């Protein structure tokens, strides 16, 4: 199969080419037409689905651009107003129509004549949406969409001063790589103290979000928001018990590896005690890795790296650059974090991140680049709904790219020693992320099973879970007030609840694909492309199967993958 990144914006047939979303009044007629359209044959139904898909693509892309522009500049009230207008005035009026259109589809007699394999996951999702829809939740969900963005507004204002210069928290983190231990501790404490200033605002925001989400769940007939969210996220292929199994597997098979990583780090730094500001540091005389200088350099080196892996991957990035679909550098007033935002109508997604010249930025860039490749590969699927793939496979796309590209990081490092250090950093991160994933996931299970908890109860439970997955290698003496609000730095808790275990599930898939890649690079990349090209048209186990992977969260399988990763780390020494 010849792959091309020359992605074309979808041609409109149902909505005028020059139409833009401004008001609900201008948009509603298209929904009315879809609702009133007679469906007298399978051909009618298929055309109707294409028309509906076109409307979905136009509306989705408009909403995405509003969010992109607002996160790129959280200080512009007009951008925030445009986003809020969509959430409060357009989205709530869309939802009743979406429900009526879903019912129209499932009640159509010709739905049985559709290709049942091709449409299975889509129809399953439509049925789920009908089951979950409640009129009473429309205003609550609109409020939640706006409230969730307050996290970025609060966090986007956080800066610290180091050596008389102001830095965002992302930029300041580079000082934690310094060989000067006093500077590291000073910056670590400044970052934490800055977070403490807004701890109350974050606590209040989270309490409101949790209670409003609980109301949404109860309105839909669920005991708690966790159970509601599992249904809404379409977790048809695993249960909360599988999540608990994953938590236990991390304790059993990942924490011992992390103990070894930190024990080695302590020796390398010549320290008696490892403190949290030491984990990213290099010994005196060893300069922190400087893989790039600015956003332009990061982009160009990423293209060179992707080119080595597969020219199609590099062409995806080039196409995005041509369209102006990157905002890479950290700056004041920009929301924190990083994302790849699929743009359903244009096809070429948008990558947003906060690069500050660190090795972790390279990881973020190739991670989001993996998501971007996924967007390109799924763009030609017939319906917008087919491109809505499960997050557990979406993160395989990104995390596999982190590991695939390691062999081609010469683009970022011109000497072998730095390249080896970078690979070591990546593999350490591949392993050390697992406990944090388990902590955040387990915390959310408790939060939503106990939605009326107090801030004191939340803090107590957070600390208990943190201890459960903490390594003895790091000394946190005297830092409890920082640790108690550690969860507040995790944007997912505020903006995309319960979206976190996916990273753990996907990391397992990524390690599995990387195992394939070490044995047969061409076959592994073929499997990768094959699975991602299916979009959301297959079940999660089927998508993993297409990638040559097992969908397995058992401790035994996780043990195998950890042993492989540990062996690969040994080879670097």
Image (cartoon, helix red, strand yellow):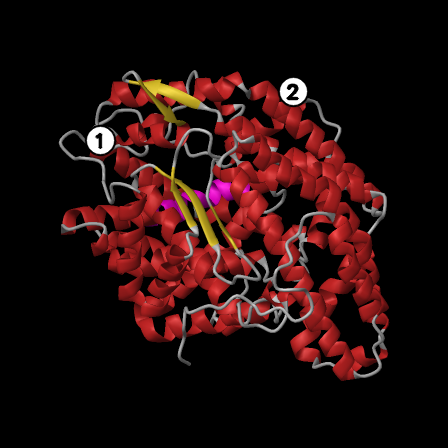
Residue pointed to by mark 1: 269
Tell me the tag on residue 456: 2
Q: Residue at x 57, y 56 (%)?
A: 391
Residue sitting nearer the eye, 452 or 572? 452
Vertical relation: 482 (above or below) 420: above
**x%, y% of residue 269?**
22, 31
119 up-or-down from 203: above or below = below
- Mark identifier at residue 218: none
Residue extent of the magenta highlight: 427-439
125 or 379, nearer to the observer? 379
The answer to whether residue 553 is visible is: no
On whether residue 368 falls in the magenta region, the answer is no
Residue drawn at 44 percent across, 52 percent down: 325
Q: Secondary structure at mark 1?
A: helix
Near mark 1 (Cα within 10 A), the count class, few <14, some 14-19 or many ≥20, is: some
Quarter holding the N terminus?
bottom left
Secondary structure under tag 2 reads helix
Image quadrant where residue 102 sits: bottom right
């Amino acid at each position: 199969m010849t792959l091309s990144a020359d992605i074309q914006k979808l041609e409109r047939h149902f909505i005028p080419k020059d139409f833009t979303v401004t008001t609900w009044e201008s948009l509603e007629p298209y929904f009315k037409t879809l609702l009133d359209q007679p469906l007298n044959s399978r051909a009618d139904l298929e055309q109707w689905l294409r028309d509906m898909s076109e409307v979905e693509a136009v509306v989705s892309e408009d909403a995405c651009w509003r969010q992109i522009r607002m996160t790129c500049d959280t200080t512009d009230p007009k951008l925030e107003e445009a986003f809020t207008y969509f959430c409060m005035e357009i989205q709530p009026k869309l939802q009743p129509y979406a429900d009526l259109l879903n019912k129209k589809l499932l009640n159509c007699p010709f739905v049985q004549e559709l290709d049942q394999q091709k449409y299975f996951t889509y129809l399953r999702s439509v049925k789920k949406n009908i089951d979950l829809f409640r009129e009473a939740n429309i205003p609550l969900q609109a409020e939640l969409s706006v409230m969730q963005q307050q996290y970025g507004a609060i966090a986007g204002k956080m800066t610290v001063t180091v050596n008389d210069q102001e830095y965002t928290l992302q930029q300041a983190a580079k000082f934690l790589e310094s060989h000067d231990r006093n500077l590291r501790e000073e910056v670590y404490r400044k970052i934490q103290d800055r977070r403490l200033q807004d701890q109350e605002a974050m606590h209040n925001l989270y309490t409101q979000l949790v209670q409003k989400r609980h109301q949404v769940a109860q309105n839909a007939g669920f005991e708690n928001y966790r159970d509601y969210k599992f249904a809404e996220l379409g977790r048809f292929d695993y249960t909360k018990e599988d999540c608990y199994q994953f938590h236990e597997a991390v304790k059993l098979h990942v924490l011992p590896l992390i103990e070894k990583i930190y024990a080695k780090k302590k020796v390398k730094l010549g320290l008696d005690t490892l403190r949290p500001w030491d984990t990213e540091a290099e010994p005196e005389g060893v300069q922190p890795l400087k893989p790039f200088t600015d956003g332009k350099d990061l982009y160009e080196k990423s293209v060179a790296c992707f080119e080595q892996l597969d020219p199609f991957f590099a062409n995806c990035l080039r196409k995005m650059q041509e369209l102006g679909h990157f905002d890479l550098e950290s700056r004041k007033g920009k929301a924190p974090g990083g994302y790849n935002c699929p743009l359903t109508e244009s096809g070429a997604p948008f990558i947003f991140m906060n690069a500050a010249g660190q090795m972790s930025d390279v990881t973020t860039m190739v991670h989001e680049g993996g998501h971007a490749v996924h967007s390109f590969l799924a763009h030609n699927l017939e319906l917008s709904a087919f491109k809505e793939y499960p997050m557990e496979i979406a993160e395989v796309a990104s995390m596999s790219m982190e590991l695939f590209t390691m062999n081609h990081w010469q683009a970022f490092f011109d000497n072998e020693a730095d390249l080896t250090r970078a690979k070591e950093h990546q593999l350490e991160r591949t392993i050390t992320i697992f406990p944090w994933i388990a902590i955040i996931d387990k915390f959310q299970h408790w939060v939503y099973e106990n939605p009326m908890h107090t801030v004191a109860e939340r803090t107590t439970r957070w600390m208990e879970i943190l201890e459960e997955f903490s390594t003895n290698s790091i000394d946190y003496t005297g830092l409890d007030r920082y640790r108690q609000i550690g969860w507040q730095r995790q944007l997912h808790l505020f903006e995309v609840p319960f979206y976190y275990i996916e990273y753990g599930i996907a990391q397992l898939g990524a390690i599995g694909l990387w195992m394939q890649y070490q044995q047969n690079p061409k076959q592994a990349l073929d499997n990768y492309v094959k699975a991602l090209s299916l979009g959301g048209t297959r079940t999660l186990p089927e998508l993993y199967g297409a990638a040559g992977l097992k969908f397995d969260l058992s401790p035994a399988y996780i043990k195998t993958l950890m042993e492989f990763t540990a062996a690969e780390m040994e080879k670097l020494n």
